[in-house]
Amino acid sequence: MAVPEIIPIAYEPDYRTSTIGRFSAGQFLASITYAFPEGFVMADGWEEQKRLLVVLHKFDAAGNYQGSDIWCAGTWAEHVKRPRGEDSVIARAEARLDAVLSGLPEREYCDIAIRPFQLTNDGVLFGLVTECHAEDQDGEEDWAELYPDGLGFSAPWDGQYDT
């Protein structure tokens, strides 16, 4: 089954899609996620390359991408040095997420439906990227992957995802 033009994403409270929904200007998809820059190769010093990012993508009511707010709260190395407390990487990320979500007027958490999009920010790929396969590839199904969160969407295109 081909990837639809508009891909539904189901709202799941207290799970990976707990910060998606609608607001006065359209739809939003927010998350806190760790990511490495594209082309990263695991080696000494990897802890400085693994960054905790706060992401807010905005879409119009029809699911067209409008823009993103992407902010780095810190690195894994910083997290290891100071894992708890109000100035920890996690606490900074959670505070930033709360702030960007609070800035969305008439915010409502609910299912959304958006069109595929992609961008690169500070060497990290972001977006809902389609993965289409030729018909003769041993039954491989087409799907869409949310980067860098690692959520995969596929048929029956009901908004549910795999990790």
Image (cartoon, rainbow, N blue to C red):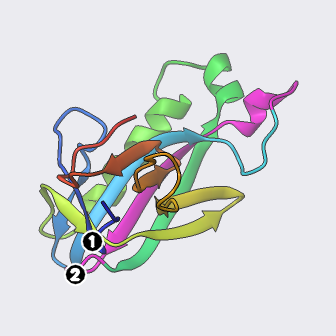
Q: Which mark is residue 62?
A: 2
Q: Residue 112: x and y, percent?
A: 19, 62
12 shown above or below 133: above
Query: Foreground residue, 125 or 96?
Result: 125
For mark 1, give the secondary structure: loop
106 shown above or below 61: above
Q: Quadrant of residue 109?
A: bottom left
Quadrant of the drawing holding the N terminus:
bottom left
For mark 2, give the secondary structure: loop
* Amino acid, disc 1: Ile
Query: Foreground residue, 84 or 37?
Result: 37
- Mark 2 residue crowding within 10 angstroms, few (<14) / some (14–19) / many (20+): few
Residue in the picture at 51% in, 59% down: 133
Q: Quadrant of residue 67?
A: bottom left
Tell whether position 45 is magenta.
yes
* Amino acid, disc 2: Ala
- Mark 1 residue crowding within 10 angstroms, few (<14) / some (14–19) / many (20+): some
Q: Residue 87: x and y, percent?
A: 53, 31
Q: Quadrant of residue 36?
A: top right
Residue in the picture at 12% in, 55% down: 110
Q: Is residue 11 left or right of residue 6?
A: left
Q: Which residue is mark 1?
A: 6
Q: Residue 83: x and y, percent?
A: 55, 18
